Amino acid sequence: MDRLIEAIDNTQNPSVVGLDPTEALVPPQVVASFADEVRDSVESPEELESAQLAVAYFEYNRTIIDAIADIVPAVKPQIAMYEALGPAGVDIYTMTCEYANQQGLYVLGDIKRGDIGSTAAAYAHHLNGVGDFDPWHEDAVTVNPYLGTDGITPFVEAATEADKDIFVLVRTSNPSSSELQMLDLADGTKVYEHVADLVEGWGAETIGDHGYSRVGAVVGATHPEEGKALRARMPHTFFLVPGYGAQGGTAADVAGMFDEQGSGAIVNSSRGIIGAWKKSGKYSESMTADEALGLVADSARQAALDMRDNLRVAVYR
Amino acid sequence: MDRLIEAIDNTQNPSVVGLDPTEALVPPQVVASFADEVRDSVESPEELESAQLAVAYFEYNRTIIDAIADIVPAVKPQIAMYEALGPAGVDIYTMTCEYANQQGLYVLGDIKRGDIGSTAAAYAHHLNGVGDFDPWHEDAVTVNPYLGTDGITPFVEAATEADKDIFVLVRTSNPSSSELQMLDLADGTKVYEHVADLVEGWGAETIGDHGYSRVGAVVGATHPEEGKALRARMPHTFFLVPGYGAQGGTAADVAGMFDEQGSGAIVNSSRGIIGAWKKSGKYSESMTADEALGLVADSARQAALDMRDNLRVAVYR
């Protein structure tokens, strides 16, 4: 986790921007501007919509990356948004990761993969590539713990080999997360606490210069008390904290998930940053695609600065 | 689940062939035969290996599909094996799904996705596509339950819209699966039993003509007693049963996961079918690529027939 921690130190900003484009988040004139370019490249008329969205997503992501690369340490593209468009979207996901990497950002691939041993080893190539070829350009990926240790170990090994990291789901930010994660176990703990203990153990052999292992945990901003307790329970586990902003989490909610030095966590905001243009009051349908992208950039940068400043006040005590 | 159940009835064969190619499973002369074709299409020399494997995987899959399409109802490509090669591999995954579909097979995409509500809705486009465009060509996908109901509902809705199905992980076949799934809850049940009850509920509104819902469950062949108990606990839930063959499960082990009519489950074998050529005793390094693929085909067909016959004896009582 050292590379991420150092990137956070360099920017004095423990936040990560979620690159989760949707049709509703990209200004329509940007999507429309790619109509001609795409028409010649698709094999059938049905593909037109997804192909057009895919190229628009890349332009939108590039605009946002350029607007924030000097003030945030990391981005977190959510692969689901790209898979929604089919393989053309997956191409855009990897191009986005590559471009963000080239701009010096740590790329956290939110892929939430998880499977049994040999299959997990195949997924782990997200981190260690194929020979010298790194098709995914991710610095870390998120992983699901439901399969247990043999589904996690291949990711830890690949991360170690490639100087990368993973983040395991522990306590997610969504409303239904409690259905499984909060169940009371016979030994008096809860399911997510048991998972937390497993995660701390999975990372034990990979603790870096800053005291955190390569195996992080996903802990939702919407659970401030549990997050604070997990901070104490998992002293060597770095937290990825989703659920800030649009999902309801505040800087005060996440403060307890940081350690006494103001390290130990990175907070994600997606819509709050990349969709800030929609709340700017400055958008108009008559804007050109370039004007709309300019507004996306300015709004995203301002929202990222606001988030940084709010976190600095709450966290760097 | 009606389409799958009818395909099983038509073949009198409750088995699914896992299309999980790896470098070790594809005869080396088949991989080598694509060296020239690939060299001109890659952007950098580092990509050569993965690009060559990707086209070899498709040729291998097509050979196996052609060899078994008349005797099995379904195939289950494991997307991890394709993602291991990067986006080029993902393209091959969708081409494999499409080809299998064209040959009349029900395609069960083993993608084990799972995320919070809005993100799950993005993943659910695996099932309902983008407008009229279906880029993935899957008839069902596997889903992870760790996020709870709001991570599942979008898949159920997309499946209903597109006349497709999902299978939720309940009790997986791998050794470490017990670490979470077998934990004792305070109410006397185990975690996987609680998940089983959720799954039965998630499907309740989608029960089809044959008495099973669109929400199936993944129950490993390596847990025969638990599988039998789950069969009784989940009367409207169809089972996908991995872990047969190479992972140790036998026809006797899975018999209890079927209902009294011999329906209610489909059993997967991957390596036992697609890697049968390696145990045939007939392979030689001097074979041409076509000869090697011929052996792959003959061995896969024979292994699929053997599995079918073993299951028929054990299941159709």
Image: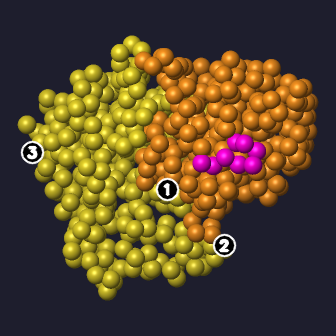
Chain colours: A yellow, B orange
Quick check: A113 left or right of B28?
A: left
**Residue ID at (20%, 60%):** A303
The total number of labels drawn is 3
Residue B238 appears anywhere in the view: yes
Residue A94 appears anywhere in the view: no
Q: Are marks 1 and 2 on the same chain?
A: no
Amino acid tagged 3: Val
Q: Secondary structure at mark 2?
A: loop
Q: Are marks 1 and 2 in contact (CB under 8 Å)?
A: no
Estimate the spatial distance between the alpha carbons at disc 3 and disc 2, rounded to whole Å. 52 Å
Label 1 Cα crowd, 10 Å radius (few <14 / some 14-19 / many 20+): many
Image disc number at residue B122: 1
Residue mark closest to the camera, 1 vs 3? 1
* Above or below for A223 versus B69: above
Residue mark closest to the camera, 3 vs 2? 3
Task: State yes or no: residue A122 in magenta.
Answer: no
**Residue ID at (19%, 47%):** A250
Q: Chain of mark 3?
A: A
The residue under label 2 is A43
Image disc number at residue A313: 3
Residue B123 on image: x %, y %: 52, 52
Which comes sooner in the sequence, label 3 or label 2?
A: 2
Quick check: B200 left or right of B103?
A: left
Q: Secondary structure at mark 3?
A: helix
Answer with the quarter of the image where residue A188 lies: top left
Point out the image quarter for the N terminus of chain A: top left
* Above or below for A31 versus B133: below
Estimate the spatial distance between the alpha carbons at disc 1 and disc 2, rounded to whole Å. 23 Å
Magenta range: B205-212
Q: Chain of mark 2?
A: A
Residue A3 on image: x %, y %: 30, 38
